[in-house]
């Protein structure tokens, strides 16, 4: 193979050829390639071999992962060194990994959490949107004729439910009764609720019964 000295810039074509093993091979040539070939044009100054084409084999270098390179070709480790990092490459790579073997609870302890593991696990569970307190029955028997419309009824509840006047409560009917609707629930005291309902006209002796579950909204 002979060489020639190129005193001026010379156009060189770099053609990429995908390889079966997943790598890419780049072929350098002074001859223009076919238009269908992926090509980059280089300007070469210096010595160009004559005769055979120059072939470059491009492979992945784990020690210089392209994902860690800066725009100027420096690796992240080299950039860190430029910024004053004084450790070895091994030490720098180790610094990218969190504390080995520590659980999330142990990390929380290191960050100042003072509770037990059971308390910490419990703290990961968000509060339910609502909590069922228990059942009530909205019922009425007319001793006199009662006109249709919206009215309020008071029902008694156990003090063990822990209801406080003004709690945000809702009534969830267990059945549907034609012509009836259950509306808002107002906690009057620890043992009584005022519930708004819509009911049709009740004649003397007529009655209705709507079983409900009372739930507290966790706001």
Image: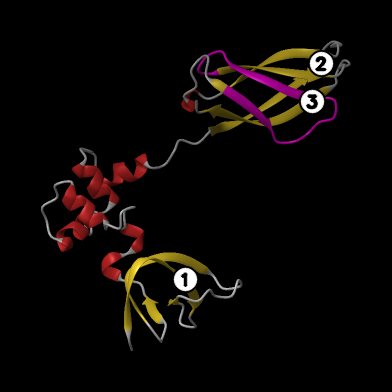
**Residue under numbered circle 2:** 142
Say the numbered circle drawn on residue 13.
1
Q: In this view, which residue lies farthest toward the front?
A: 7
Q: In this view, which residue lies farthest toward the bottom?
A: 1
Identify the image quadrant of residue 46. Answer: bottom left
State the CA–CA distance, disc 2 to disc 1: 100 Å
**Residue under numbered circle 3:** 208
- Mark 3 crowdedness (10 Å alpha carbons): few <14, some 14-19, many ≥20: few
Q: Can residue 96 be seen here?
A: no
Task: Tell me if residue 186 is in the magenta stretch.
Answer: yes
Give the mark nearer the N terminus: 2 vs 1. Answer: 1
- Mark 1 crowdedness (10 Å alpha carbons): few <14, some 14-19, many ≥20: many
Task: Specify the segment rendered in magenta.
Answer: 169-191
Q: Nearer the viewer, mark 3 or mark 2?
A: 3
Q: Nearer the viewer, residue 65 or 47?
A: 47
Q: Nearer the viewer, mark 2 or mark 1?
A: 1
- Say if 128 sits above or below 81 in the image: above
- Mark 2 crowdedness (10 Å alpha carbons): few <14, some 14-19, many ≥20: some
Tally the marks.
Answer: 3
């Amino acid at each position: 193979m002979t060489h020639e000295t190129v005193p001026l810039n010379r156009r060189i074509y770099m053609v990429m050829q995908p390889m079966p093993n997943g790598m890419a091979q780049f072929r350098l040539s002074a001859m223009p390639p076919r238009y269908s070939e992926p090509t980059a044009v280089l300007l070469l100054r210096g010595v160009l071999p004559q005769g055979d084409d120059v072939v470059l084999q491009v492979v992945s270098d784990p020690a210089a992962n392209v994902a860690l390179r800066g725009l100027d070709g420096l690796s992240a480790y080299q950039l860190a060194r430029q910024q004053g990092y004084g450790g070895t490459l091994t030490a720098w790579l180790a610094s990218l990994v969190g504390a080995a073997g520590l659980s999330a609870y142990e990390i929380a302890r290191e960050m100042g959490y003072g509770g037990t593991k059971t308390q910490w696990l419990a703290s990961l569970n968000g509060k339910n949107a609502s909590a069922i307190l228990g059942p009530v029955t909205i019922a009425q028997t007319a001793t006199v004729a009662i006109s249709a419309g919206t009215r309020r009824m008071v029902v008694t509840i156990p003090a063990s439910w822990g209801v406080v006047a003004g709690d945000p409560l809702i009534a969830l009917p267990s059945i549907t009764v034609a012509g009836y609707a259950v509306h808002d629930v107002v906690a009057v005291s620890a043992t009584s609720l005022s519930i708004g309902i819509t009911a049709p006209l009740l004649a003397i002796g007529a009655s209705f019964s709507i079983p409900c579950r009372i739930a507290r909204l966790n706001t």
